[in-house]
Image: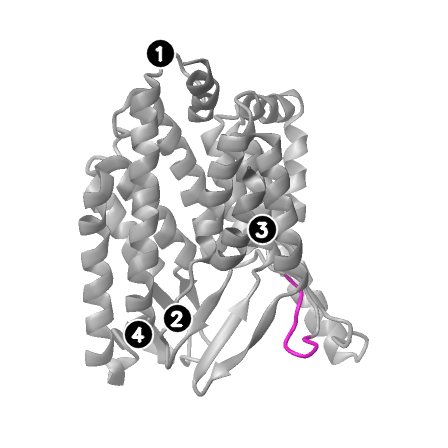
Amino acid sequence: MPWAFIPFLMLLSIWIAPAGDLLWNFQTLLIPVAAWIGYRYGIDGVKAVFYASIPLLLFRYNGEIAVSMRFHFGTSGGTLLAALAMAWLAAAPENPEKLASYLREKPARLAWLLLIPLTYVAPAIGGFQIRLDNSLSVNVAFFILGLIHAPLKRPHLICAIGGMVCIGIVAIIAEVLLREGGVLSFELGRPAYLFFSPQDVISVVLFLFAGVWTRTFLKTGEMPRSRFLWNTPILLIAIMIYSQMQFGLLPGFSKSIGVTGDGYVSILCCLLAGLFFQKRGILIVLPPLLVLSLLSPAFDEFRNLGEALLPMDMRFYIWTRPPDRVFSLILELFLWTCVGAQLRAWSHTAQLEAPRSFLSMRAETKDG
């Protein structure tokens, strides 16, 4: 019965920070686990994921369980929304085609994407807090678009992404003006629109292409080939380096505007590494992570990896994450590599003969 997995989903939502920058957090694994529950149990599995999501959203707790040890229960609305979406997508073989047909009939329905970055953070009461942080769900939404092979034209996607960026910029300007005018108060919580920076655009584009690459590999059993993917290991290494770094240009480090790597992209990179190279894929994506983490303290006086003075008092800086935080990611990234490897194993078992989503394997497995 899928209901037995509800306590396990709650257990995955717990993260512990023993000391310093160490952080043991596996909340993103809620997504593949929810997808498997939906794949295995159908609509009952989706219901189980939904019922587990209610306490994880409403009873989000952050506190201390010992000296210098923080404890957190629950997760953001974005992670739960992504888990529910993947569970529903895997629950029935016809669901991906239903979604693709829904978008094919009226591409203007992509406008629903404009609502996903909306977020709301309620005030904390006794350590409990509700947080609708949908940054991860935006990335997963674009991954699903690539995975289901929705016949969307490039202008439609550009309009959707551009619309989200415009709304995000307007929302930031409006918040600043209203706050300075004393009109906006955060006593009842803080609404926001989390899509406005360059890294947001880069992340959704990477997730979109990753969905296409995943579908292509699961359908043909071969790594995607194109002039941009002449060497897939190098591509994965480049994506991993980007996910862990930040680049900036403008006067003053604290006032600069730059591009920050997205930690969710590193998870995506490990998923692709496991899919393309099985569990040994971790040997491709892990070395750059370790090298960057070891270089960080060595160049701390230059703001981690470096800072260069340019004409007109301009500065270029580049830095990476603290070593403790990077080492905390290793186990989580390895597990995501295992998820990709398991996805590859399922695709080989299914013996696909026609272009269709890998999620249709559920029907073939039952018939067999």
In front: label 2 or label 4? 2
Q: Residue lying farthest bottom?
A: 67
Q: Disc 1 versus disc 4: distance between alpha carbons?
A: 46 Å
Q: Disc 2 versus disc 3: distance between alpha carbons?
A: 20 Å
Q: Read off the residue under disc 1.
A: 353
- The number of callouts visible is 4
Residue 36, how many percent across, how many down?
Answer: 46, 37
| In front of the other: 131 or 305 | 131
Q: What amino acid is at disc 3?
A: Leu
Secondary structure at numbered mark 2? loop
Which image quarter is the C terminus in? Answer: top left
Residue at 23% x, 39% y is 278
Which numbered disc flags the more N-terminal residue, 2 or 4?
Answer: 2
For the residue carrying disc 2, how many other residues have a C-alpha within 10 Å: few (<14), some (14-19), or many (20+)? many
Vertical order, 144 against 265 (above or below)? above
Whether residue 64 appears in magenta in the rendering, the answer is no
Q: Read off the residue under disc 3.
A: 80
Q: What amino acid is at disc 1?
A: Glu
Q: Read off the residue under disc 4.
A: 324
For the residue carrying disc 1, how many other residues have a C-alpha within 10 Å: few (<14), some (14-19), or many (20+)? few
- Magenta stretch: helix, strand or loop mostly: loop
Q: What amino acid is at disc 4?
A: Asp
Q: What amino acid is at disc 2?
A: Leu
Secondary structure at numbered mark 4? helix
Secondary structure at numbered mark 1? loop
Residue 247, how many percent across, how many down?
Answer: 35, 66
